[in-house]
């Protein structure tokens, strides 16, 4: 999931899971709206993505036959507002699955318009929106579910959450011309307004296999 050299046990752990989650699961005030934000947007005890099912099956096979062993209590998939301890893992995933040099620290200025998805303390997905890109328009800058945790409704819920935070505003985004997420956006009512040649060219490394072209989509309200 992460890449790069391991500088130290502490820094690696911080990149992987941030710091201890229970120290941060308290309400906090948004610097953008002054709203008090709850520790969780949602706690999902029902969804079982493939990655989670494989982990549970491996654990069961490992301990099968051991006297007194019981499966662990189910842990939820947690949807939270972004906080500073999430940023190292979020940035690392962005650099792995998008392009180098991404730093989403700025999103801490408007956490109301974010969603970070955790299993235990591990970041498995995130979505961020810029709420005031124009007077009547909000812009989804990044949305990602780790490939091992996809096809379980995580991306759909994050998109739904972001849309609900900006009622009354148009919501826009760019999506790669070859990204299958286009189908998800269309289900939510987004429609293409423009096809932009080489939109991602300035971000992608030379010889990148990723498609540089993008659609600009809009959800009209």
Image (cartoon, rainbow, N blue to C red):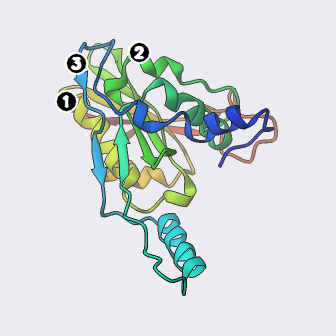
In the image: residue 215, left or right of residue 14: left
Instruction: Give the total number of marks visible in the rendering.
Output: 3
- Can residue 173 be seen from the camera position used here? yes
Residue pointed to by mark 2: 109
Residue pointed to by mark 1: 167
Disc 1, SS = loop
Question: Residue 25's x, y, as percent?
Answer: 35, 33
Circle 1 residues within 10 Å: few <14, some 14–19, many ≥20: few
> Of the residues under marks 3 and 2, which one precedes in the sequence?
3
Residue 35 marker:
3
Depicted 215 relative to depicted 100: above or below: below
Nearest the viewer among 210 and 79 is: 79
Circle 2 residues within 10 Å: few <14, some 14–19, many ≥20: some
Depicted 211 relative to depicted 69: above or below: above
- Can residue 189 be seen from the camera position used here? no
- Of badges 1 and 3, nearer the viewer stands 3
> Of the residues under marks 1 and 2, which one precedes in the sequence?
2
Q: Are marks 3 and 2 in contact (CB under 8 Å)?
A: no
Q: Are marks 1 and 3 in contact (CB under 8 Å)?
A: no
In the image: residue 173, left or right of residue 38: right
Nearest the viewer among 206 and 142 is: 142
């Amino acid at each position: 999931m992460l890449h790069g050299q391991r500088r130290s046990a502490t820094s690696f752990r911080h990149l992987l899971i941030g710091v201890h989650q229970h120290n941060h699961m308290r309400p906090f005030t948004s610097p953008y709206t002054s709203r008090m934000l709850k520790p969780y947007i949602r706690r999902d005890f029902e969804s079982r993505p493939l990655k989670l099912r494989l982990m549970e099956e491996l654990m069961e096979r490992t301990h099968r036959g051991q006297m007194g062993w019981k499966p662990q209590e189910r842990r939820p998939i947690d949807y939270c507002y972004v906080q500073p301890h999430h940023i190292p893992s979020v940035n690392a995933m962005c650099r792995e699955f998008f392009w180098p040099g991404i730093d989403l620290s700025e999103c801490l200025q408007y956490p109301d318009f974010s969603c970070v998805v955790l299993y235990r303390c591990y970041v498995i997905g995130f979505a961020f929106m810029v709420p005031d890109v124009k007077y009547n328009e909000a812009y989804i800058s990044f949305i990602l579910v780790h490939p091992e945790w996809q096809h379980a409704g995580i991306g759909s819920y994050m998109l739904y959450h972001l849309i609900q935070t900006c009622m009354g505003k148009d919501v826009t985004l760019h999506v790669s011309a070859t990204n299958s997420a286009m189908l998800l956006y269309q289900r939510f009512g987004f429609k293409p307004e423009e096809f932009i040649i080489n939109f991602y060219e300035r971000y992608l490394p030379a010889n990148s296999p990723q498609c540089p072209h993008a659609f600009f989509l809009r959800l009209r309200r």
